Amino acid sequence: MNGRARTANTLPIGVGLVLLALALPGALAADVPQQQAEAAKKPKAAVAPQVTPEEASQAPESPVEMSPEAKQLPETPTEKKGSFKPPPDYGAYDTSEELAVYTGKHLNDTVNPPVDVGLGLYDRGAYAPRPIFFGEKNPTYFHFMAYGDMRTAVADNDTGVKFANGKTFQSQVATRLNLDLDLNLTPTERIHAFMRPLDQNMMFTRYDIDGGVKDKFFQEFNSKLLTLFFEGDLGNMLGGILGRPSKFDLPIAGGLIPIFTQNGIWIQDTFRGFSFAVTAKNSKALDISNFDVTFFTALDGATSPAFNGHGSAKIYGLAGFADLLKSYLEAGYGYVEADDKDLSYHNVTAAFTTRIEGTVSNSVRLIANFGQKAAVKTANGLLVLVENSLITSRPLTLVPYLNLFAGFDSPQSLARALDAGGPLGNTGINFQTDGLTGFPALDAAGHDSYGGALGVEYLFELQRQIVFEGAAVERMRNNPLGAQYAFGASYQQPINNAWIVRVDGMRGWIEKLRDIYGVRLELRRKF
């Protein structure tokens, strides 16, 4: 046997495959008549009749099956005008704009706090693992900042009230420092303080130029903390202690706390107490997409004309808001327990904000006081505020407005700091003082009076603001105070990211008293 391999003869196999390929189609064709015969014996399936388009349009429609949660519209959207907005216009594709998403970024020119210790407000980059003093699920986020603003104004004001030398005007330069001290402990817990070191007892560091006081400097200084409180989330704190993710949110605050509700109309004050809130809830049955309720207690330090000069008072109350019916609802209740029991009373508020036919933005606010037993009631009656602004073609920048009010008897805000002005402060600029130079204003208490403000605000391209306004206060019943009228204007503009300049002027006509006027120029430095 040699070493070569044998090769098989493949010719017979190839001939067989060719013969098989030629015979197979014939065999299959022979079975076709037999299959047709068997198929003919089976019953034929019904054939759907041909329907013309005219007959189809007259045929009854079969019911549409849908899930029980779905709601069928009474008419198709295409039949209702305005059901669909025009499709978006994306414009021509621009490669440079697409690349700018990645290559066109830059740091904004911002104001950095003068004191910024810890992780920092504008830090960049990744952080090292944080300490877990308060639990693994509530890591430490230490950060301390001091920030705020300084306001300096030069003014010439005439309030109509005579000084000792018989003059009614005062020109001066005054300054005010608002200083916030913020210590972050974790992402949800912090200790916050606020102070105004350049004023005390509503008197500011100033230089009186001429008028009631001439050529005299007053240095007002104090180190008093106006607020000092702790705030955090109880759910997050318990999650850190127990070592598991938080299952609920419950914001809390305690100490010398500030409370500001309804743009400062119902409450604008600071007092010793505590508060907690139930947040971010909803109700499908009531068509409420979101609502919050805050419960608060003032144990000491609350301020109100209702009990000033008669000791202090405790306040127990709640305030909440809800997004519902395509509108916005605010409500609150507070019980004021004064040292003089006859001055204790109930305070209730409600406010509803909506849009009318897409043309007018309207808010109606009510503050009602009742329950005092004193012979002379200091908190009694009802205050009605109606705020209206016209929705123009430039709704964010051009805002004509008409705000009205009516006060019956002597209604009060629940709590109001002495330098916060009256509850009519948001009715118009002619009801606002400046909290610095004693800028004159119309009577903002709303006691046995009615009136309003008509004006227009223009924000240009959101880089400056100008306001023109006329306002009036009329008296009702036996109110001995006379009618008041005023015209005012205000202009402010940022100089850069830190400085703002503002100019205000007003002229008022007061029945039975001297007319009033004021003009002021203010520079504000943010830091």
Image: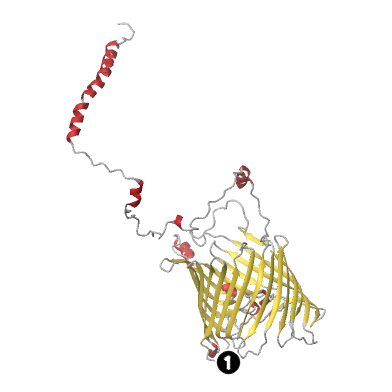
Residue 130 on image: x %, y %: 54, 56
Residue 506 on image: x %, y %: 73, 76
Residue 61 on image: x %, y %: 33, 53
Please indicate, yes or no, whether residue 278 appears anywhere in the rendered image: no
Q: Quadrant of the C terminus?
A: bottom right
Please indicate, yes or no, whether residue 203 appears anywhere in the rendered image: yes
Against 360, is 132 above or below?
above
Against 130, is 8 above or below?
above
Foreground of the two, 174 or 71: 71
The residue positioned 80% from the left and 81% from the top of the image is: 211
Q: Quadrant of the N terminus?
A: top left
Left or right, 374 with respect to 156, comes to: left
Toward the top, the furthest residue is 2
The residue positioned 59% from the left and 47% from the top of the image is: 91
Foreground of the two, 274 or 81: 81
Foreground of the two, 482 or 366: 482
Left or right, 206 with respect to 375, comes to: right
Residue 55 on image: x %, y %: 33, 48
Colouring chosen for the image of the structure: secondary structure
Toward the bottom, the furthest residue is 375
What amino acid does circle 1 point to? Answer: Val
Location of residue 150 by image quarter: bottom right
Toward the front, the furthest residue is 54
Foreground of the two, 343 or 428: 428
User: What secondary structure is marked by label 1?
Assistant: loop
Q: Which residue is mark 1?
A: 376
Left or right, 333 with respect to 307, comes to: left
Looking at the rendered structure, the number of numbered marks drawn on it comes to 1
